[in-house]
Amino acid sequence: MNYSLPTGRAGEAKKLKMSFTLAIVGRPNVGKSTLFNRLLEQRKAIVDDVSGVTRDRQYGVADWNGKTFNVIDTGGFVARSSDVFEKEIAKQVLIAVDEADALIFMVDAHTGMTDLDDSMAGVLRRSTKPVFLTVNKVDNHERMLEANEFYSLGFDHVFFIASASGSGTGELLDAVSELIKEDSSEEIEEKNALPKFAIIGQPNVGKSSLLNALVGEERTIVSDIPGTTRDTIHTHYKLFQKEFVLIDTAGIRRKTKVHEDLEFYSVIRAIRAMDEADICLLLIDAAKGISAQDLNIFSLAARKGKGIVLLVNKWDLVEKSTNTAKDYEKQLKERIAPFTDVPILFISAKDKTRIFKAIETALDVYDSRHRKIPTSELNDVMLKAVEAYHAPVVRGHPIKIKYVTQLPTVVPSFAFFCNFPDDIKQPYKNYLENQLRQHFNLSGVPVRLFFRKK
């Protein structure tokens, strides 16, 4: 349900700008996953010439010209007949149309226009969302001439690209980024809003049980059947001199198991809940341990700059010895490395064990995420750290860091002014981040470091 935030301890809440979501749609084997990988600058989706390789949706975060947005790579539908196609492709595309802010409609210049392209175009033309018709595999002059036939589909925005090489993708992303409005008041609005904690994790780890235990009433249906929570649920919490908003999300399931259309809605909304939240309470099942999908959720929250608290739920079901918790925490930190400065709590939502400690910790992480460190104090600490361990020499010249300042951003970000900003390697960046974490309480908070010419 939608909840209107009341006036809280930090002032009157305002509506926050929601994140921007871009969906890539098109028939099978036109290069959607190749473009998806290029946008994310990583090989996340499997790419193959066999149609229908992407059977489920992929999700990620992309950056372009300083703007960040969600990207969804939809699976291509393999039609058995035109009637089945018309029904099923419309269902899949309409889900993307409904949840995305804009769509890339990808077609293939090599194959040319097909009936499947025409049918999908008919579905997209009925949408009010911006559609960028993207003709892929245009890698020579002859293909460019042949690709002009796609103008007949009737879309205003047409782009000719070769996603394998990246040709033309810059112009496409420029057009997409123009739709993402920069709001200079976003930081002020976020400060004035109540803290928002998203309860995230895979299905059936106890997210709804935790919410119910915290608020003391049955706000959500609790069941052993995974996927009971289909939508995000906002709950205003105002007890024990604490006030915040809890967001219970649908479980984020591994992509190979996202078959139902309704569950596809749930996954997108859970990812959107991350965007809306300040802190993500990531629940994992104590008996199952942290899985690859848990790590994906953790990485996505960190990439989005959200504060993170790891909650190991169902701890009451684990057989314990002297060092069980200590050993479990050590294994967790090995899996989530390199971002290991994260609070880890062992809880039982069912028995209400340490659940209020989890909220106390989340509020501490929230304060750390919004802390502004005085420039004088920052320089006193960090310049001493630089003197204690200098950056490696570059082409016979020593790297000199002269000044450090915190940037006015929501995610804690620090600018280091030096003579060779492009030559500072990752190990030294890790050293500086560790020094920041050692001297200033930034537990559970992703940190951004930037190096600029002095």
Image: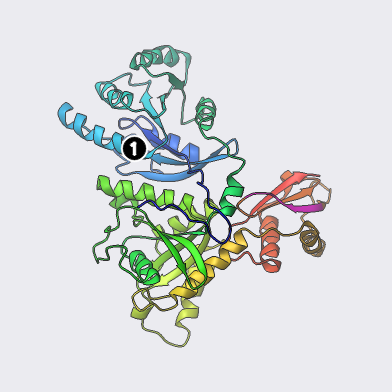
Does residue 213 sit above or below 270 in this rendering?
Answer: below
Q: In this view, does 374 lie to the left or right of 271?
A: right
Residue 179: percent from left, percent from top: 50, 31
Region of the chain picked out in magenta, as a range = 402-409
Residue drawn at (68%, 49%) of the image? 408
Residue 274: % across, % down: 46, 53
Looking at the rendered structure, the kind of residue marked 1 is: Asp
Task: Pick the residue in front: 84 or 361.
Answer: 361
From the image, which quarter does the C terminus lie in?
Answer: top right
Residue highlighted by disc 1: 98
Task: Tell me which corner region of the image, top left, top right, bottom left or bottom right, holds residue 288.
Answer: bottom left
Q: Residue at x 44, y 34 (%)?
A: 35
Residue 171, relative to residue 337: is it above or below?
Answer: above
Q: Mark 1: few, some, or many residues within 10 Å (few <14, many ≥20)?
A: few
405 in magenta:
yes
Residue at the spot 83% in from the left edge and 48% down from the top edge? 396
